[in-house]
Image (cartoon, helix red, strand yellow):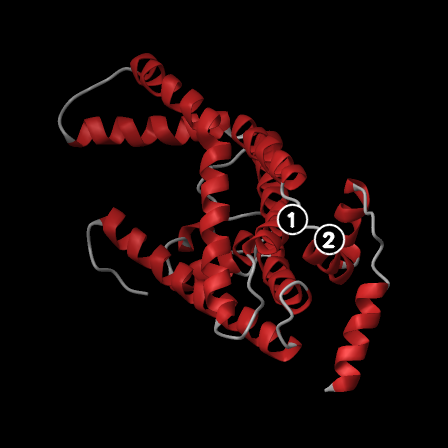
């Protein structure tokens, strides 16, 4: 026990007192342990929140055409089903303000999601004895969420240059290798969660709570794995449920 305490003290002594934003991003990728030890003592959320906001707006702008096409098809089908008709020009005029509003509020929605996720993670990790103090965890998860924005940007750029539906699986997931016709199946939902940045995110959560929250490493990593498995199974099940509701019939897994 004492040797572990001494080792932890030495690790913290090796962390620089100052770390510029570029070094923080570098540490997030190449040395997350150092970043989380730094944020433990000097938590900061402004810079990652600025990046998250800019990235979120950029994603919405890149996906505007794809989202417009998807929404136009949805509205057109809804009117057709109700026995009414509407021209493409009328539909486009109808959804344009909605798309502008979506872009404008996207950073706030993303920030709200980030705050809720952080509180949930904090509540869960309190059961495995993480330290109290929310600020460092908000800082830690803000940097981890940069991976989510990076994934969204890569996907948006792919759709922008190569085309495709905004509802397709992320190009960085295993689901992108499956037949799109299988979307809505449990296998497709499972493969959608087996995505590079999603897995990386949970790895960083385990490391983050071990070093910023002083949770025993084994407990922290096991908790992160369990959370990943639960969310993966839930996402796959939710995809099946959504598919059944859309189809209006039970169907099969």
Q: Is residue 15 above or below residue 108?
A: below
Relative to 80, residue 249 above or below:
below
* Camera-side residue of 72 and 40: 40
Closer-to-camera residue (227/194): 227
Pointer 1 with pointer 2, Cβ within 8 A: yes
Residue at 75% x, 79% y: name it. Answer: 5
Q: Give me the C-alpha separation between circle 1 and circle 2.
A: 7 Å
Q: Quadrant of residue 67?
A: top left
Q: How far across and how far down the image is residue 193, in percent? A: 51, 59
Asked where in the image residue 210 lies, by quadrant, the reply is bottom right
The x and y percentages for residue 229 are: 48, 69
Residue under the point 30% across and 13% down: 90
Q: Residue 186 or 15: which is nearer the viewer?
A: 15
> Looking at the rendering, in which quadrant would you find the C terminus?
bottom left
* Left or right: where 183 falls relative to 36: left
181 sits to left or right of 134: left
Q: Residue furthest bottom?
A: 1
Label 2 crowding class (10 Å Cα cut-off): few <14, some 14-19, many 20+? Answer: many
Q: Which residue bears the numbered disc 1?
A: 143
Mark 2 — residue? Answer: 28
User: The N terminus appears in which quarter of the rendering?
Assistant: bottom right
């Amino acid at each position: 026990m004492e040797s572990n305490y001494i080792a932890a003290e030495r690790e913290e002594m090796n962390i620089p007192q100052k770390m510029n934003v570029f070094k923080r991003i570098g540490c997030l990728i190449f040395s997350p342990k150092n970043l989380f030890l730094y944020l433990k003592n000097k938590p900061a959320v402004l810079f990652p929140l600025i990046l998250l906001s800019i990235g979120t707006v950029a994603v919405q702008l890149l996906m505007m055409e794809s989202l417009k096409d998807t929404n136009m098809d949805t509205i057109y089908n809804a009117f057709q089903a109700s026995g009414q008709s509407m021209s493409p020009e009328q539909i486009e005029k109808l959804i344009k303000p909605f798309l502008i509003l979506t872009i404008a509020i996207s950073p706030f929605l993303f920030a709200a999601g980030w705050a809720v996720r952080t509180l949930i993670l904090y509540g869960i990790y309190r059961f495995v004895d993480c330290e109290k103090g929310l600020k460092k965890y908000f800082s830690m998860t803000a940097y981890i969420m940069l991976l989510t924005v990076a994934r969204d940007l890569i996907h948006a750029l792919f759709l922008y240059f190569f085309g495709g539906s905004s509802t397709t699986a992320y190009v960085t997931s295993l689901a992108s290798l499956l037949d799109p016709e299988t979307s809505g199946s449990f296998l497709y939902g499972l493969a959608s969660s087996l995505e590079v940045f999603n897995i990386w995110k949970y790895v960083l959560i385990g490391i983050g709570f071990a070093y910023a929250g002083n949770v025993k490493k084994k407990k922290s990593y096991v908790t992160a794995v369990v959370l990943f498995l639960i969310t993966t199974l839930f996402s796959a099940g939710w995809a099946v449920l959504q598919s059944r509701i859309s189809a209006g019939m039970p169907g099969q897994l």
